[in-house]
């Protein structure tokens, strides 16, 4: 087996500073132009065989080809930050008010940047590696846009891997399992239209108040089971409701409702959507209201294939990285599942970011720099194991 070279101390110093620079300059989903430019500038010295920009928005892909037939391996990370004000006091805190890298995407990019350095020094023994810096993960739109981009056809992989840091798990401990590992979810936006009236004569109008009052608990009652124990797990969370305008003289004539639907599998999501839409239409029809239904932030299930999960497990054993299957499956969502499909073996891996780490999306979260070499070593190990001479 040909091993990729290891990271030097100077590599780790440079990568850490690069990660902190990313952290200082977060950009939201669909706005990652400057982040993508930083990525391209980082990639050029590693001399990839090709770099494609603008994938699915601001996505960047770099190809490292051995020149010998073999598998194509995609390693994916995310470009986007979050619309959250950072409260940490460290020197590399966000310089952009109201925005922060509070999910660790800056660290994920840096682990992939470390692999770029290694591949720049030595290509795999056979096959090729695609380093994918994906836009708009937080909204669920990015992976779908990348996969739909005609330019992605040249990068379609045989294997696809991603790592996400995970607070509450010992630093560097990995989690891997086959099957569904992260839930499908979508934001359901309901708009009801009736007719306003004077507040002294509500009978002259058509208010959605009663329909909304009945519908909210009915939607919440669609939930079923627990994510880790029930294969038919589903959840409907009422997130926002608005009735009319904040005026005392007007009986409301319209309303809107935001509901997050969540399910462990795509098939269960289809059933949950049908059930929720039926309830909404019945509520509107019974009260003579017009109804519009729209969806946002649509995530499919992320499901690890048995073959990919087995490869990760063997690599973790070889590298002596502690691992297990907890805390999978997770009720949260990730759009990495979009890279799966016919002919692609896919695995999402968790790496613990520390027992005492603030939770993801907390305003004081910061990716631990000590995780950079661990994640890079795992990614590089997967490349080594899959591209070893036959």
Image: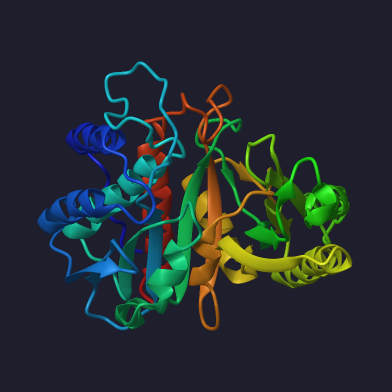
Task: Determine the residue positioned at 56% across, 61% down.
Answer: 296
Whether residue 95 sits left or right of residue 350 in the image: it is: left
Whether residue 195 sits left or right of residue 134 in the image: it is: right
Residue in the foreground of this view, choosing between 207 and 62: 207
Considering every residue shown, the one lying at the far top of the view is: 89
Query: Compared to 320, does 1 lie above or below?
Result: below
Query: Compared to 29, does 48 lie above or below?
Result: below
Relative image position of residue 75 (x, y in whole percent): 39, 61
Task: Determine the residue positioned at 31% across, 57% down.
Answer: 3
Quarter of the figure with residue 262? bottom right
Relative image position of residue 130 (x, y in whole percent): 32, 67
Task: Determine the residue positioned at 46% across, 63% down.
Answer: 141
Relative image position of residue 182 (x, y in whole percent): 64, 55
**In the rendered view of the protein, which quadrant contains the N terminus?**
bottom left
Task: Determine the residue positioned at 43% across, 41% down.
Answer: 82
Whether residue 98 sits left or right of residue 19 in the image: it is: right
Residue 184 at least partly seen: no
Total numbered circles: 0
**In the rendered view of the protein, which quadrant contains the C terminus?**
bottom left
Quarter of the figure with residue 382? bottom left
> What colour scheme has been applied to the protein in the rendered image?
rainbow
């Amino acid at each position: 087996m040909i091993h990729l070279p290891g990271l030097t101390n100077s590599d780790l110093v440079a990568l850490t500073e690069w990660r902190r620079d990313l952290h200082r300059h977060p950009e939201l989903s669909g706005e990652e132009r400057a982040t993508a430019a930083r990525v391209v500038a980082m990639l050029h010295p590693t001399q990839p065989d090709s770099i494609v920009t603008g994938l699915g928005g601001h996505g960047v892909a770099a190809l490292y080809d051995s020149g010998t037939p073999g598998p194509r391996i995609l390693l994916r990370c995310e470009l986007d930050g979050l619309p959250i004000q950072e409260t940490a006091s460290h020197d590399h805190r966000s310089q952009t008010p109201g925005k922060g890298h509070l999910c660790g995407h800056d660290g994920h990019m840096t682990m992939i940047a470390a692999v770029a350095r290694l591949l720049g020094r030595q290509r795999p023994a056979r096959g090729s590696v695609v380093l994918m810096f994906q836009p708009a993960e937080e909204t669920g739109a990015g992976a779908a846009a990348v996969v739909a981009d005609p330019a992605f056809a040249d990068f379609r992989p045989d294997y696809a891997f991603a790592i996400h840091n995970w607070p509450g798990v010992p630093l560097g401990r990995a989690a891997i399992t086959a099957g569904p590992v992260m839930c499908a979810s979508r934001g359901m936006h309901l708009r009801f239209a009736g007719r306003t009236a004077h507040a002294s004569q509500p009978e002259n109008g058509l208010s959605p108040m009663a329909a909304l009052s009945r519908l909210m608990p009915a939607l919440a009652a669609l939930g079923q089971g627990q994510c880790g124990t029930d294969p038919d797990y589903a959840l409907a969370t009422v997130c926002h409701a608005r009735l009319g305008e904040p005026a005392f003289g007007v009986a409301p004539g319209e309303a809107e409702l935001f509901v997050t639907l969540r399910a462990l599998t795509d098939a269960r999501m289809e059933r949950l959507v049908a059930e929720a839409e039926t309830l909404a239409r019945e509520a509107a029809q019974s009260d003579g209201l017009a109804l519009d239904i729209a969806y946002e932030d649509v995530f499919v299930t992320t499901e690890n294939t048995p073959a990919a999960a087995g490869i990760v497990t063997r690599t973790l054993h070889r590298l002596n990285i502690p691992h297990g299957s907890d805390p999978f499956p997770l009720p949260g969502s990730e759009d990495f599942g979009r890279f799966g499909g016919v002919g692609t073996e896919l695995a999402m891996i968790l790496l613990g970011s520390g027992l005492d780490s603030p939770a993801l999306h907390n305003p004081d979260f910061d990716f631990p720099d000590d995780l950079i070499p661990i994640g890079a070593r795992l990614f590089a190990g997967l490349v080594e194991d899959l591209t070893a001479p036959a």
